[in-house]
Amino acid sequence: MIKIPFNKPPLVGNEFEYMQQAIKDGHISGDGTFTKKCHHLLEGSLGVVKSLLTTSCTHALEMAALLIDIQLGDEVIFPSFTFVSTVNAFVLRGAIPVFADIRPDTLNIDENEIQKLISPKTKALVVVHYAGVGCEMDEIGEIAEHYGVEIIEDNAHGLFGKYKGRYLGTIGSLATQSFHETKNFSCGEGGALLINDPQYSERAEIIREKELIEAGSLGVWWINTLG
Ligand SMILES: Cc1ncc(COP(=O)(O)O)c(C=O)c1O
């Protein structure tokens, strides 16, 4: 009987050399030489304002939910077919998920189903480029702009995929990547947040450093507590 593996991790041959180099350099946590190289590569090749490596796409989605400041009762529109993390990240912060049907040809969110789901409470629209095939971003972008709703791209599957000549992950205000071993580009488990709207850059750095108290509120706390 032939056993078909669920996936084969993509390995290119330099992994041992690079791991040895990191160990020799004495820097095996994040934000070392290799993180910087990845940021440089993602920003240079995609043309995004900023990229931040994370421990997973799930983590990047959590950051996106914090960055757009999801509050209890905000509605977020998702495709009805995706991985749990796409939705959990927002629901855990109090969002109400609103599911749009998907297209039978691409399994992506059906752009014609979105408008009727928008309400005054809609805060964001999360699209998933399923299997790296782009959603209909022209139509989706028009709806989002018309109603003043943020677009987040869950691009876990689609690094370097394109929609009408534009790289997936460069269209929404934020986008997320997965480098889990089931994806085309992998580091075992990992991810990235791509930032296209520069208003999120500084706060994203702070959140990524696990500093969830904003610099502003910390200042207020400092003044109130210590005079
Ligand atoms: C569409 C989608 N989003 C998010 C994720 C989560 O990725 P990760 O395992 O890097 O957290 C996956 C994982 O398969 C996914 O398919």
Image (spheres, rainbow, N blue to C red):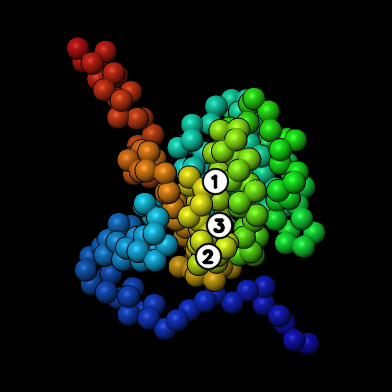
Give the residue type at disc 3: Asn
On the image, numbered disc 1 is attached to which residue? 152
Residues packed near mark 2 inside 10 Å, few (<14), some (14 to 19) or many (20 plus): few
Side of 225 where 113 appears, left or right: right
Side of 214 where 33 appears, left or right: left
In front: mark 2 or mark 1? Answer: 2
If the image is split into quadrants, where does the N terminus sit? bottom right
On the image, numbered disc 2 is attached to which residue? 165
Residue 25 lies, in percent from the top left, at 21, 68
Residue 31 lies, in percent from the top left, at 30, 57
Kindly identify the residue that appears in the image at 65 percent across and 60 percent down. 130
Give the residue type at disc 2: Gly
Kindly identify the residue that appears in the image at 59 percent across and 77 percent down. 8
In the picture, the disc for residue 155 is 3
Kindly identify the residue that appears in the image at 75 percent across and 86 percent down. 2
Residue 96 lies, in percent from the top left, at 66, 32
As drawn, 217 above or below 37: above
Residue 140 lies, in percent from the top left, at 63, 46
